[in-house]
Amino acid sequence: MTEFLQLTVYGIVLGSVISLGAIGLSLVYGILRFPHFAHGDLITLGAYLALVVVTALNAPVLVALPVGVAGTAAVAVAIDQVLYRRLRRVAPVILLIASVGVALILRSLIQIIWGPSNQVYEQGIQFPWRIMGVGIKPDHLIIVGGAAVLVVALHLFLQKTKTGKAMRAMSDNADLAQVTGIKVNNVIIWTWIIGGGLAAAAGIFLAMDTRLHPVMGWRLLLPVFAAAILGGIGRPYGAILGGLIIGLAQEYSTTVINPSYKPAVAFAIMVAMLVVRPTGLFAGKKA
Amino acid sequence: MALLNVEQIRGGYGDVDILHGVSMTVDAGEIVVIIGPNGAGKSTAMKAVFGLVTVREGRIRYKDAPITNLRPDQVVRAGVCYVPQEHNVFPSLTVEENLEMGAFIRNDDYSKEMRTVYELFPALYEKRKQPAGALSGGQRQMVAMGRAMMLDPALILLDEPTAGLAPGIVDQMFENIKKINSLGVSILMVEQNAQQALALAHRGYVLTTGRNRHSDTGPNLLADRDVREMFLGG
């Protein structure tokens, strides 16, 4: 029982990280209709931008978080306006391939700048609290709480603000959004701000829980995709649920299989979902 | 001075011309209907006004200002609203949010227009918190027209507003169009239900193969032998 609860804690922490990545992936797909393969490397970039603040100012991670989020959002917008924007009129598969290229460029740049080895925000070990034999680290609370705050903020943005509503409208029907007078490019820029920002938060939280590495985001991309597809791609609310399911499933699986197969669990769930219900739990977009 | 003036436009999608010289005018307060066989370029002519089709020759003027080949959002800002034939609501947004999107370009208070829409279509007021995708076909069409009304436009373009609706709802939809017109909004519409549309319209244009074929008042076109044979079953 204790082991089950312990894995549940780990699963929710991992699920929070995956959810934040999957929301952005799903939003971008809903608006631009292509799977953004560089999303994992935006996750990595966010973690490293925060590291810069942590080392330069000797600041706590939570102070560095807004900087990493803002910096990654800016990079995401810049990549879109410089590269993806020119490709909007072509087939989505071209955008997909372009994003694979962006992924490789980002990863290589990160490796050149920060080196290929593992790094951490803070040295030393955090001692977990013991609650009924279940270990919970303070960082776990920060990660889950931070993710919850961001998800609530996103919900309020999508439901209450004019730009958020326009984003949902454009995800519903981009052509109709255009003839209604919605400024399509502004909505796209906001999509990247949110998608990039949430990816950065995911990366920073992941690095708090584990460590920084140039392929940390790339390795997370498969579970992130699985979560987005599970929730119904293009549906940000589905991505939240999908992320938690994938996170929990990966952790629970370690009781029966070797932990190194965790990504395979995400992959298996994704394949099973595509076979049984291709639109996902929340009836996602058709390509 | 006509509200909308389309002069001898030629154009189409990509490199292929569908329109080979189409002209039409809409005066303030008029209902003007475009009829014609399939592939005559009716919807294309309407989309050309809205900047959705490349116009290679001729010109389009609205309130005496050129709007030829403007982007759709620029045409909206000029004061023309367009209701596409299909997929003309945002299904996951509520009815009210759909109307708000109609007012997207406005930064002022649009509660007056929203009241007008709910007075026109009381059924929408009851369903204002429901997603538009859950509504019936007729109600969705009301949402689409209501969204166009949110800018208090002088001219609304309707692309086959009765397509796919049950016969009883079709009558209701023509009534709605009349009501909108009675508020002083000019209407240019493409319609397959030629008989009913001409009975309602002040004037009509008959297009064939991307050209003007006839233009006359609604009643005269209804009485015209050629038109009757072509569209009204003799």
Image (spheres, coloured by chain):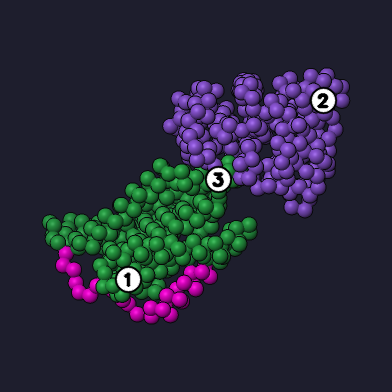
Chain colours: A green, B purple
Within-10-Å neighbours for mark 1: few <14, some 14–19, many 20+: some
Kindly identify the residue that appears in the image at 51 percent across and 47 percent down. A171
Instruction: Provide residue A277's location: percent of width, then percent of height.
Output: 46, 48
Kindly identify the residue that appears in the image at 40 percent across and 72 percent down. A215
Is A109 above or below relative to A133? Answer: below
**Residue B123 lies within the magenta run:** no
Q: Chain of mark 3?
A: A
Task: Give the secondary structure at mark 3.
Answer: loop
Image-based side of A251 in relation to A227, left or right: left
- Report the magenta residues as a range: A100-128
Q: Amino acid at mark 3?
A: Ile
Kindly identify the residue that appears in the image at 36 percent across and 65 percent down. A68
Q: Which residue is mark 3?
A: A182
Instruction: Provide residue B35's location: percent of width, then percent of height.
Output: 76, 30
Task: Give the secondary structure at mark 2.
Answer: strand
Instruction: Provide residue B93's location: percent of width, then percent of height.
Output: 47, 39
Looking at the rendering, which quadrant does residue A33 occupy? bottom right
Is B42 above or below relative to A36? Answer: above
Q: Which residue is mark 2?
A: B216
Q: Amino acid at mark 1?
A: Val
**Residue A102 lies within the magenta run:** yes
Is A226 above or below relative to B77? Answer: below
Quadrant occupied by the N terminus of chain B: top right
Image-based side of B215 in relation to B162, left or right: right
Query: Are both tags, 2 and 3, on one chain?
Result: no
- The answer to whether the residues at label 2 and label 3 have Cβ atoms under 8 Å apart is no
Q: Which residue is mark 1?
A: A53
Within-10-Å neighbours for mark 3: few <14, some 14–19, many 20+: many
Query: Are both tags, 1 and 2, on one chain?
Result: no
The answer to whether any part of residue A202 appears in the image is: no
- The answer to whether the residues at label 1 and label 2 have Cβ atoms under 8 Å apart is no
